Amino acid sequence: MKKVGIFYGPEGGNTESTAKKIGHLLGQEYHELISMKNASAGDIEKFDNIIFGVATIGQETWDAEPVESGWFRFKTELEKADLQGRKIAIFGLGDHVRWPSQFVDSMGELYRLLKKSGTDTIGKVSAADYTFEESTALLGDLFAGLPVDEDFEPELTDRRLEAWVAQLKKEFDS
């Protein structure tokens, strides 16, 4: 398997720890962890296999002015990157109890941005194992990537990550 670039944000917290767990499951020699805080289009283009990890979007984010760092800044770099021919997977942190009508919506927003650039994602996951009301990350009965709820379902995270990484290894190699 070619090396996988794991781009995540924000630094610290559940998104970064989930990215590290995914990296561990892929194997030391098969991944590079990259905070999207200072990542460029050139950093993205170094990889044929890419995983993007995004945090949940809460009310404080919807009402806030865009900030110069984080995914708001990275979006500009992502739009510049040549993504053609790359295999891209997404994981998103969500909270199905406090935000059941916006569950992993940030993953859905990232998916729409990737589709707009002419690419699709691998690593889609069945929604059957999740409890929520609505999600922009839902594509029929599949999520655009892997939802992770560390706030209310941390006991399911390791099992979900193991299954997803096994799926990705096959899809990255195909």
Image: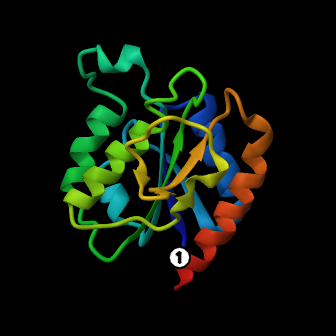
* Callout 1 secondary element: helix
Q: Quadrant of residue 163?
A: bottom right
Q: Quadrant of residue 161?
A: bottom right
Residue located 62% across and 33% down the image: 14
Q: Which amino acid does label 1 sit on?
A: Phe
> Is 153 drawn above or below residue 22 in the view shown?
above
Task: Pick out the residue farthest to the bottom.
Answer: 174
The foreground one among 71 and 162 is 162
Residue located 52% across and 85% down the image: 174
> Is 104 drawn above or below residue 167 in the view shown?
above
Which quadrant would the N terminus be assigned to in this image?
bottom right
> Is 42 drawn above or below residue 110 in the view shown?
below
Q: Which colour scheme is used?
A: rainbow
The foreground one among 27 and 168 is 168
The foreground one among 123 and 76 is 123
Task: Pick out the residue farthest to the right.
Answer: 155
Number of callouts in the render? Answer: 1
Residue wearing tag 1: 172
Residue located 60% across and 24% down the image: 97
* Residue 64 in the image, given as x and y percentages of width and height: 29, 14
Relative horizontal placement of residue 152, taking residue 95 as reference (left or right): right
Question: Does residue 28 show up?
Answer: no
* Residue 113 in the image, given as x and y percentages of width and height: 26, 51
Relative horizontal placement of residue 20, taking residue 171 as reference (left or right): right
* Residue 30 in the image, given as x and y percentages of width and height: 62, 68
Question: Does residue 167 show up?
Answer: yes
Relative horizontal placement of residue 158, taking residue 86 as reference (left or right): right
- Mark 1 surroundings within 10 Å by alpha-carbon count, few (fewer than 14), some (14 through 19), many (20 or more): many
